[in-house]
Image (cartoon, rainbow, N blue to C red):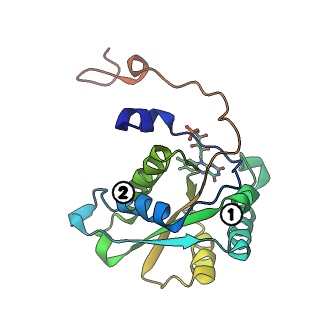
Amino acid sequence: MDFEQAVKARRTIRTFSTREVPDELVRALIDCAVRAPSSMDGQPWRFIIIRSSETKKSLAEIKDKYCPPEKREFPAGFLCNAPVVVLTCVERAGSYDRGIENGVLATAHLLLAAANYGLTSVYMSAYKTGTPEVADEIRAILNIPADFEPITLVPIGFPGAEPGPKNIKTPDEVIFHETFGHR
Ligand SMILES: Cc1cc2nc3c(=O)[nH]c(=O)nc-3n(C[C@H](O)[C@H](O)[C@H](O)COP(=O)(O)O)c2cc1C
């Protein structure tokens, strides 16, 4: 797949095939994630590859516990059916006050790399602003040290369904020239 095809193929699908995602493939995704830019080139990332059913269940429970049903598009239980979940965390000291951006950019690379290999992935946050319990509980079950911040949680697998319909904005809808609002 060329780059543009991979970017345009990337979609969130929450139904996974039972087809295994081997460690070498996950490693190839991480090898793309670590090519992301980072503040001061700090490369503060660590990626935890989660395959344990018990751990996936605990992560889904934490997500649902702190996200009330009315604010939730999808209950997090689907992540238990993903063959693999990648938790991206960043070291605070190596993030130069830009931990979230560093973690999110590496995650964006991960999502696009997954699409390139025909995998689907779901972006999920591993923290909640104003609710430190989310990151704390995730840290506790994954044994993440206090000087690392969990940023994202990405279930990955081969798709077990077609993506839903989606209206994608055209470039003309979102481009302004020189100043805001000027087309
Ligand atoms: C910041 C952010 C948070 C998200 N959180 C969740 C989440 O908690 N649960 C979930 O199922 N999907 C989550 N998503 C995935 C979005 O629902 C999905 O990307 C969006 O519907 C667009 O669909 P697409 O990825 O197929 O283009 C999140 C995406 C982003 C960027």
Q: Amino acid at mark 1?
A: Lys
Q: Is residue 40 left or right of residue 97?
A: left
| Front position in the image: 9 or 170 | 9
What residue occupies the far right of the structure in this picture? 69
Q: Give me the residue at 39% from left, 17% from top.
A: 172
Secondary structure, mark 1, is: helix
How packed mark 1 is, by other alpha carbons closer than 10 Å (few <14, some 14-19, many 20 or more), is many
Mark 1 or mark 2: which comes first in sequence?
2
> On the image, which quarter does residue 44 sit in?
bottom left
Q: Establish if 7 lies above or below 39.
A: above
Q: Establish if 74 lies above or below 11.
A: below
Res 16 visible: yes
> On the image, which quarter does residue 39 sit in?
bottom left
Pair 1/2: label in front: 2
Secondary structure, mark 2, is: helix
How packed mark 2 is, by other alpha carbons closer than 10 Å (few <14, some 14-19, many 20 or more), is some
Q: Which residue is mark 2?
A: 32
Q: Amino acid at mark 2?
A: Cys
| Front position in the image: 183 or 51 | 51
Instruction: Name the quadrant of the C terminus.
Output: top left
Q: Position of residue 80 (x, y in %)?
A: 72, 63
Q: Position of residue 158 (x, y in %)?
A: 62, 49
